[in-house]
Image (cartoon, rainbow, N blue to C red):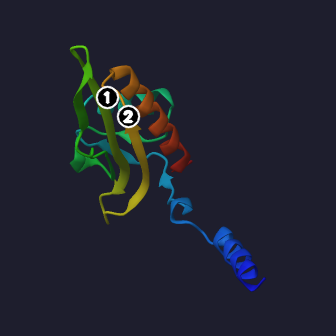
Amino acid sequence: MRPRFIAVLLAAFVALCPVGTSAQRAAVPAGSKVYIAPMTGDLRPGLRAALEKQKVPLTLVASEDDAQFVIAAPEDPEAVSLSNAGGGAISMRIHRTGTITLRSKSDGATLWSEKWELRSLSPKDEQKLAAKLVGSLKKAVRK
């Protein structure tokens, strides 16, 4: 009986504790000047287009020197593997992952971040990913 009570008490404690992934993000002031750092593939132009299409109230600048914030998405080493699928066919598997961040140039603080995953080399899939990431960023912008 006692171990069951301890297990229930522990489960209730864990359920009520805040988790690191649900921590609140600092708000990004609307109208802030933002620079999108160079990235692999079509993610950078996709982000730029999605920011404009979704009317995110941020000002994109061409130089990092002019920016207050920097959007960067360093990509984990690209996981592309080839394997013999039998019958002379070759199978290619793609799994790209990374974390996109918006950080302040003044103090280096990260105001927003989002993990991403892509299993394709298709530019359309990169555009969809960019739109999804910008949708998440838009929620962090204080109007």
Q: Is residue 85 above or below residue 80?
A: above
Q: Nearer the viewer, residue 124 or 58?
A: 124
- Residue 95: percent from the left, percent from the top? 33, 36
- Which mark is drawn over residue 45? 1
Q: Secondary structure at mark 1?
A: helix
Viewed as shown, does residue 127 lie left or right of 14?
left
Q: Nearer the viewer, residue 77 or 49?
A: 77
- Alpha-carbon span between mark 2 and mark 1: 16 Å
Earlier residue among tags 2 and 1: 1
Viewed as shown, does residue 141 lie left or right of 94?
right
- Which mark is drawn over residue 19? none
- Residue 6: percent from the left, percent from the top? 70, 82
Q: Can I make out residue 40 in this image?
A: no
Q: Which amino acid type corresponds to the residue marked 1 in the rendered image?
A: Pro
| Residue at x-position 30% and y-position 29% | 93
Return the residue found at the far right: 1
Q: Which residue is mark 2?
A: 118
| Residue at x-position 38% and y-position 59% | 110
Q: Is residue 30 above or below residue 25?
A: above
- Quarter of the figure with the N terminus: bottom right
Q: Which amino acid type corresponds to the residue marked 2 in the rendered image?
A: Leu
